């Protein structure tokens, strides 16, 4: 198989990963030997929501399918623990590491430690600070969603729904994480272009359902005039719906709720008329991540960034998308 054919085969294997940016591998990047089986690490950031559980399940299922040994760690929401988890994987002599970094900056030492130890590292789902570590240079590649585009898509569709007028409460994801940073950036930029729309409060709910509920409750008390809640993930949106109902407001009527992910509870909320839409962020990384590692082992030049193609869920497709959700 030629290099070109192999890359084409990889791209079709990664139906999950739709668009590819370009980026060459530098000579200093650790190589991965071709072997029958591998011992690989997956450093998960936390397991506090269905998205994370679906991601872990997908990674474990793919490892099992291929007969690879998977060293799995859960950082339980601590960037410091996640750095220690990666160091422990290095000490255990894994062949490669898949890392979902909790935050952009604190995980840089883990990326650099793997490189120094000669272990190829693949970033999946979340990114790290691009000024401090680069795909194709410090780590092999980033596989994940375009979080900036997710925020922009949420903003543009919200503007349409609201006819250009709205008073918005924003529930941000985990501070310092790439999805929180980029979903805010993309969304806020769209809103800034619409003079009839205003974000009156923006606060972190840490991508967590109950924290989202608590923050929404406080923000609704401070801004009873708000008629939109934009949450950086479905879990916080579901929490916000509970806060709205507790405050005697009707989600979907008094306050429009929009979000990102596409988990089952959010699709149900769309069907129930409580949520307007959810921009997809697909958590099922197993096939794409392991295919990328195999391709890299064969000598393929992977792009520095491999971007997933995400869908958009609203009342037109929520019911039909249920079976495939998590
Ligand atoms: O990094 C992806 C985000 O992290 C998902 O939107 C969220 O649900 C998860 O915790």
Image: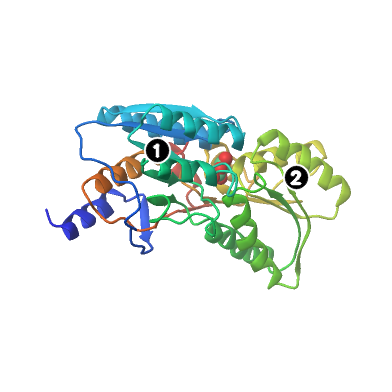
| 140 on left or right of 197 | left
Residue at the image position 70 percent from the left and 70 percent from the top: 192
The residue singled out by tag 1 in the image is 97
Q: Which residue is mark 2?
A: 250
Total number of numbered discs in the rendering: 2
* Location of residue 310 with respect to 86 vertically, above or below: below
Q: Position of residue 201 (x, y in %)?
A: 79, 54
Tell whether 51 sits left or right of 62.
right
Residue occupying image coordinates x 45% and y 53%: 310
Colour pattern: rainbow
Residue with the most extreme left position: 1
Dot 2: what SS? loop
Asked where in the image residue 189 lies, by quadrant, the reply is bottom right
Q: Is residue 156 above or below residue 224?
A: below
Describe the element under mark 1 as helix, strand or loop.
strand
Residue shown at the point (61%, 45%) measured from the top left: 233
Q: Is mark 2 within 8 Å of ligand 1?
A: no
Q: Give whichever of 190, 114 is nearer the camera.
A: 114
């Amino acid at each position: 198989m030629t290099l070109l054919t192999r890359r084409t085969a990889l791209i079709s294997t990664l139906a999950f990963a739709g668009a590819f940016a370009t980026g060459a591998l530098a000579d200093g990047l650790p190589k991965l030997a071709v072997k029958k089986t591998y011992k690989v690490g997956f450093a998960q950031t936390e397991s506090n929501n269905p998205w994370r559980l679906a991601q872990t399940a997908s990674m474990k299922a793919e490892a099992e399918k291929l007969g690879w040994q998977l060293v799995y760690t859960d950082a339980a929401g601590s960037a410091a623990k996640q750095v220690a988890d990666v160091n422990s994987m290095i000490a255990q002599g894994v062949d490669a590491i898949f890392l979902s970094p909790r935050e952009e900056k604190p995980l840089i030492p883990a990326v650099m430690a793997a490189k120094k130890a000669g272990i190829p590292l693949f970033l999946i789902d979340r990114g790290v600070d691009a000024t401090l570590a680069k795909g194709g240079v410090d780590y092999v590649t980033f596989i994940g969603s375009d979080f900036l585009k997710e925020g922009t898509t949420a903003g543009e569709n919200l503007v349409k729904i609201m006819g250009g007028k709205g008073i918005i409460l924003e529930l941000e994801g985990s501070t310092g994480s790439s999805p929180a940073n980029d979903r805010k950036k993309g969304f806020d930029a769209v809103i800034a272009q619409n003079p009839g729309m205003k974000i009156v409060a923006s606060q972190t709910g840490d991508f967590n359902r109950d924290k989202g509920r608590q923050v929404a409750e406080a923000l609704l008390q401070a801004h009873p005039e708000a008629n939109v809640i934009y949450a950086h993930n479905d879990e916080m949106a579901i929490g916000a719906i509970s806060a709205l109902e507790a405050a005697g407001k009707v989600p979907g009527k008094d306050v429009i709720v929009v979000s990102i992910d596409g988990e089952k509870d959010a699709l149900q909320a769309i069907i129930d008329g409580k949520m307007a839409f959810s921009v997809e962020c697909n958590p099922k990384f197993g096939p794409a991540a392991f295919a990328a590692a195999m391709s890299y082992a064969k000598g393929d030049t992977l792009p520095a960034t491999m971007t997933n193609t995400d869908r958009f869920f609203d009342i037109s497709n929520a019911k039909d998308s249920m079976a495939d959700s998590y």
